[in-house]
Image (cartoon, grey):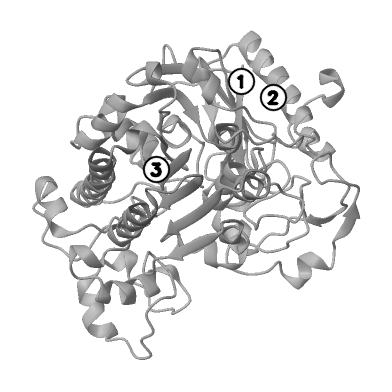
Amino acid sequence: MKTVFVLFDSLNRHMLSPYGGRRVPTPNFDRLAARSATFEKHYVGSMPCMPARRDLLTGRLSFLHRSWGPIEPFDNSFPELLAKEKGVYSHLVTDHFHYFEDGGATYHTKYDTYDFVRGQEGDRWKAMVQPHWDRLKEKYAAAQFKTDRRTYKAQNIINREFIKEEKDFPSVRVFDAGIDFIDRNKDADNWLLQIETFDPHEPFHAPETYKKPFDTGWTGPILDWPRYGRVDELPEECEELRANYYATIALCDALLGRLLDQFDRENLWRDTLLVVTTDHGFLLGEHDFWAKNRMNIYEEIAHIPLFVHDPRRPESHGQRVEGLTQTSDLAPTFLEAYGATLPAEVSAQSLLPMLEGRPSAHDCILYGYFGGAVNITDGRYTYHRYPPDLQTQEIYQYTLMPSHIYEPFAIEELQEATLAEPFSFTKGTPLLRIPVKPGTAMSRAYGPGCFIEDDTRLYDLKTDPGQQNPLTDPVAEQKLADAMTRLMSGLNAPPEAFERLSLNQEASA
């Protein structure tokens, strides 16, 4: 068995033609869908980027205990398990620079080898001691021009001075490296390749050839990085921001097409598992918001694409799979594909039985940000339950790796740490129990202090697929609250996770 796993970042499901998208032509996603099972109800788990990847590697949700942080010493990871039990060689090629910050520093080491392509967003790549800030200020819109060298936006401005031609773009180089790996190893067996690109994550930077079909007539400075929050730009600015996202989607489709050409050329379809998905979606003005992390986890963010080509199950090719699935299901899927043992700590399901028409093991899906709402869907309804006050809730992080996204936990946080008893998934290991403090890197980026919306809501996706009108239905709400309590109990959520949401943990026993 061979596996190619393609992971995009912020790839909107509803933009892709296999899911009904019409604004951006995506012929290569159509090619993929014809050869694969297309999953209709695939959802996120822990949010955003690195929490999603922890779910993906370990096969269990982490957002009830922990925000953005490294893989923990007690965590399972499917690349390590495959290597130890089945001798599967794994290789990661990525331009996702969060792997190389404090909060992601133990992910890439789980693979046998890895190739880091430099230059995306705020990657500390190119060193320029005295940038020509006066010239660069004229080049970029004021909203995305920064000179503080430690900010992502300032570093991105410098990086982009070295990205001129299509061949220079990090996502292009990622697929170059992935295709090269396949060329060198296509005659070998028992390997897994993860091709992961930060695109179409903001900033929406694509080669000019991909922008031409979406030309808005914009003559102002570069505007391709929307703020996280409410839409307050002028209409023409909104159109330019969206057009640049469309261009990046078109680039992703073209890169996927290069990989599919290689599958055709080498007939990899006969013996290679191919999985293509993303970590989450991205709001482009829907619900009057840009991005994520500040608002309710609407369907545009939570409901994500998934394609699975399994050469051993040809009857699934071109079919639609209706059952509920989520990001954490990928780890057990890869383990089962190679006949590896599923660890007891895994709380997710393998997707492979669903390719044979079997039902999903999930009757509901749980998802969310640490410290925000706990969200649940049964495929018909979505329910987003917030604590009464995000700012005063009692909440703790449980970890042995106290790092935030790009810096360690502050001394003020660690001074209040205590030792917590082991959880069911920590293999007998006690953890640091650290109270959430305002002003930390987590709370500044995507923690409780960042949310603009914080009211509990129920939506009926059948009658209100756009989630425009919150529903009052006490019976449906109670049913989902009970399911939420049951799933949280199964994940060994800490007591305060129930208390902050006014859920009766004992009722699930």
* Residue 138 or residue 260, whichever sits in front: 260
* Residue 112 or residue 140, whichever sits in front: 112
Callouts 1 and 2 close, C-beta under 8 Å: yes
Callouts 1 and 3 close, C-beta under 8 Å: no
Marks 3 and 2 sit apart, C-alpha to C-alpha, by 25 Å
Taking the image as shown, residue 300 lies to the left or right of residue 107, namely: left
> In what quadrant of the picture does the C terminus appear?
top right
Question: What label sits on residue 332 in the rendered view?
Answer: none
Amino acid found under the numbered disc labelled 1 = Cys
Taking the image as shown, residue 87 lies to the left or right of residue 257, namely: right
* Residue 317 or residue 452, whichever sits in front: 317
- The answer to which of marks 1 and 3 sits earlier in the sequence is 3
Instruction: Say which element carries label 1.
Output: loop
Q: Report the residue at 59% width, 60% height from top.
A: 104
Callouts 3 and 2 close, C-beta under 8 Å: no
Relative to 243, is 1 above or below?
above
Q: Give the quarter of the image for residue 37.
A: top left
- Discs 1/2, front: 1
Q: How many labels does the image show?
A: 3
Image spot of residue 483 (x, y percent)? 69, 19
* Residue 86 or residue 64, whichever sits in front: 86
Amino acid found under the numbered disc labelled 2 = Met
The residue most toward the bottom is 130
Question: What label sits on residue 484 in the rendered view?
Answer: 2
- Discs 1/3, front: 1
Q: Give the quarter of the image for residue 308.
A: top left
Marks 1 and 3 sit apart, C-alpha to C-alpha, by 23 Å
Instruction: Say which element carries label 3.
Output: loop
Question: What label sits on residue 282 in the rendered view?
Answer: 3
Marks 1 and 2 sit apart, C-alpha to C-alpha, by 8 Å
Image spot of residue 499 (x, y percent)? 80, 34
For label 1, the residue is 364
